[in-house]
Structure formats: C-alpha cells, structure tokens
C-alpha cells in the first residue's frame, strides 16, 4: 500500500511541478516582457487582472496540491533513507517547497499586493511598475528553476524506484 501511495505522490508531484514550471517559464520568458512594453497603467491593470483571476482558477488546486504532495514526499523520504530514489524524492520536495512555495509567499505575493494597492495612473504607479516588473520576474525565474529542477528530480526518483 505504501508503494502505491508513494508512486501516486511522485507522479502527481512530477506532473504538478511540470505544469507550474511551464506557467512560470511563460511568465519569465514572454508575458512579463510583453507587459513591460505597454504603458505602465495598462501593465498594472493587466497584471492585477491576472492576479485576481489566478486565485479563482484551477491553478490554485495544482499550486497547493503539488506543495502538499512535495511536503508529504519529504516526510516519506525521511523514513526511506537509503532506498532507491529517496535522495531525489527528498531533494525535489525540499527544492520545490523552498524555491517555489516559500519564494511565492515571501516575494511574489507581497509584490502583487503592493501593485494592487497603487493608483495605476499615478507617478508612484509608474515607478512601482518599473521595479515590480524587474523584481517579480527575478523571483519568478527562481520559481521556474525550482519547479523544473523538482520535476527532473521526481522523474529520476520514479525511474530509480
């Protein structure tokens, strides 16, 4: 039974990490650059619309579900030390939770909150937007790398089990 549970968690996490890595990759490589090319007020409005919609979308189930399964895999790995795939499972969970979830909560969400509270048509809004695009994208790169790395490590764990 434990093998089936572990396999299910590994597959769910690998797929979730891959899906989220794709979303973050898209934002890092062309969405934010495109938003930065339009006037600040329009960029702010577009990003605020995205941030409002994303919390109502199925994205959140994948976001939280993958985080929970990553934590579960870390815990399971601690009880399976020395078994095939355990190190990859442990590393994947830790990298994902810290590099994706913690980074999101500590950096991206506060940046989103600040953006939601600024007048898009003000000088303050334009200044904030320029900093936001740069800072948010840097932290999004971290989420992209963490999600991709975790996906790779989870596939390695699946393959070595």
Image: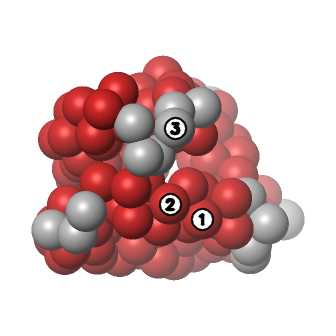
What distance separates the C-alpha of mark 2 from that of mark 1?
Answer: 6 Å
Q: Quadrant of residue 157?
A: bottom left
- Callout 2 environment at 10 Å: few (<14), some (14 to 19), or many (20+)? some
Q: Which residue occupies 50% across, 60% down?
A: 45
Query: Which mark is in front, 2 or 1?
Result: 2
Disc 2 vs disc 3: Cβ atoms closer than 8 Å?
A: no
Q: Which mark is residue 49?
A: 1
Q: CA distance from mark 2 to mark 3?
A: 10 Å
Q: Mark 1 Cα within 10 Å, few/some/many (few <14, many 20+)? A: few
> On the picture, is 111 further left or further right than 16?
left
Q: Earlier in the sequence, mark 2 or mark 3?
A: 2
| Camera-nearest residue between 47 and 58 | 47
Residue at left offset 28%, top offset 40%:
126
Can you say which quadrant of the picture contains the C terminus? bottom left
Q: Which mark is residue 105?
A: none
Report the number of numbered marks: 3
Per the rendering, the mark at residue 45 is 2
Q: Nearer the viewer, residue 12 or 109?
A: 109
Residue drawn at (47%, 67%) of the image: 46
Task: Classify 10 Å Cα crowding around label 3: few (below 14), some (14-19), many (20 and above).
Answer: some
Which residue is at the front of the view, 119 or 74? 119
Q: Earlier in the sequence, mark 3 or mark 1?
A: 1
Please state which of residues 88 and 33 is positioned toward the viewer in this rendering.
Answer: 33
Q: Is residue 71 above or below residue 140?
A: above
Number of the front mark, 2 or 3: 3
- Furthest toward the right, the residue is 1
Residue 119, disc: 3
Residue 137 position within the rendered picture, expressed as x and y whole percent measured from the top left = 23, 48
């Amino acid at each position: 039974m434990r093998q089936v549970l572990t396999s299910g968690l590994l597959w769910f996490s690998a797929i979730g990490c891959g899906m989220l890595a794709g979303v973050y990759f898209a934002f890092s490589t062309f969405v934010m650059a495109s938003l930065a090319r339009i006037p600040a007020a329009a960029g702010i409005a577009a990003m605020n619309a995205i941030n409002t919609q994303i919390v109502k979308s199925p994205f959140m189930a994948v976001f939280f579900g993958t985080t929970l399964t990553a934590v579960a895999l870390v815990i399971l790995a601690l009880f399976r030390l020395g078994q095939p795939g355990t190190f990859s499972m442990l590393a994947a969970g830790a990298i994902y939770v810290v590099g994706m979830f913690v980074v999101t909560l500590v950096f991206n969400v506060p940046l989103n909150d600040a953006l939601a509270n600024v007048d898009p048509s003000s000088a303050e809004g334009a200044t904030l937007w320029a900093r936001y695009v740069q800072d948010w994208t840097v932290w999004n790169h971290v989420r992209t790398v963490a999600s991709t790395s975790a996906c790779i490590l989870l596939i390695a764990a699946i393959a070595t089990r």
